[in-house]
Amino acid sequence: MDRHRARGRRARPSRRKPVLHVLVASAVLVGGTAAGTVYVKAQAHDGPGPVSSSPTSASSSVSSSVSPTVSEEASVEPVAEPAVDRDALLTKAMKAVTAEDGGELSVAVLDLDSGESAAYGEGTFDTASIVKVDILATLLLQAQDADRHLTAQEKTYATSMIENSDNTSASALWRTIGQADGLAAANKRFGLTGTEGGDGMLWGLTQTTAADQLTLLRQVFGDNSELGESSRTYLQRLMGGIAADQHWGVSAAADGSEWALKNGWLARSTTGLWDINSIGRVTVDGHDYLVATLSNGNSTKAKGISLVEAAAQAAVSAFQDTADN
């Protein structure tokens, strides 16, 4: 974009006069009084012919110090939008979500479009069956490293483990990945820092945090992942094909059928209380959110399901309340 400024002599006329993209004010002396014409948001025009712009007469006087041959360029500084405290909004929304006495609840959420996230609650939780996503992610990563495809048997196990939450299939793949050691090696690459695999074959007692589960979901649904595109697509497809009797959990926050998830539920033999967890992706008003909800100390499975569903809805509301602002 060319710029013309007065340098003590009159500029030579030209047939091509580029029009500035910014606010331009010109002033001419009329009858001893400075009057002007203001052009706002002039379009770029480097050739002959009319310029599409909206001249507006300036009824007020312009300072007599303005030179009649000088064009002044007005710069406008962008105004930054105020930062939104998503954690504070989530904490406020969670006031209506209460765990039973002695129970614990933690939730983490990420807006895939903006990259903003929020979290509520702390501590570690038994994974129960949500660890099956981690098991399959580990298997896929190991297969990538070995430059091989999953075997037919591994695919059968994977489908049954994710879609039907089959424990026998999970145990078979837990052995295949090397149990807790294999899981830990993969999780180090995935960026999980607070997850520890269960002892021996007790994969359901793997310990994790909501923040780690959100990190795992980013590996499955995000682009910046250790998993290749085909591995991510495969896992996403299985999480979107969950059996009908398991259509609960974070899907309660979706505004339709656009969701993919894995739930976990476990009644502890020592207390009779339930671990209820749900992780996945939901779509609300065209935005994709990753949500992880973990809980323990629930007196019944049904109460635990209601709790994690309310937590997922509260998590998304921390973004929806300001979505139109």
Image (cartoon, helix red, strand yellow):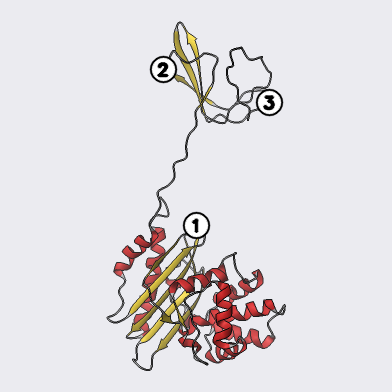
Kind of residue sitting beneath label 3? Gly
Q: Which one is in front in this view, the residue at disc 1 or the one at disc 3?
A: 1
Q: What residue did someone put label 1 on? A: 114
* Label of residue 47 in the image: 3
Residue 81: image location, x then y, percent: 42, 47
Dot 1 or dot 3, earlier in sequence? 3
The residue at the far top in this view is 31
Q: In which quarter of the image is residue 43?
A: top right
Q: How crowded is mark 1: few (under 14 residues within 10 Å), some or many (20 or more)?
A: few
Q: Residues within 10 Å of mark 3 (few under 14, many from 20)?
A: few
Residue 183: image location, x then y, percent: 56, 82
Residue 302: image location, x then y, percent: 36, 83
Q: For mark 1, give the secondary structure.
A: loop
In the figure, 210 relative to 2: above or below? below
Kind of residue sitting beneath label 2? Ser
Q: Quadrant of residue 308?
A: bottom left
Kind of residue sitting beneath label 1? Ser
Q: In which quarter of the image is residue 315?
A: bottom left
Q: What residue did someone put label 2 on? A: 59
Dot 2 or dot 3, earlier in sequence? 3
The residue depicted at 32 percent of the width and 81 percent of the height is 103
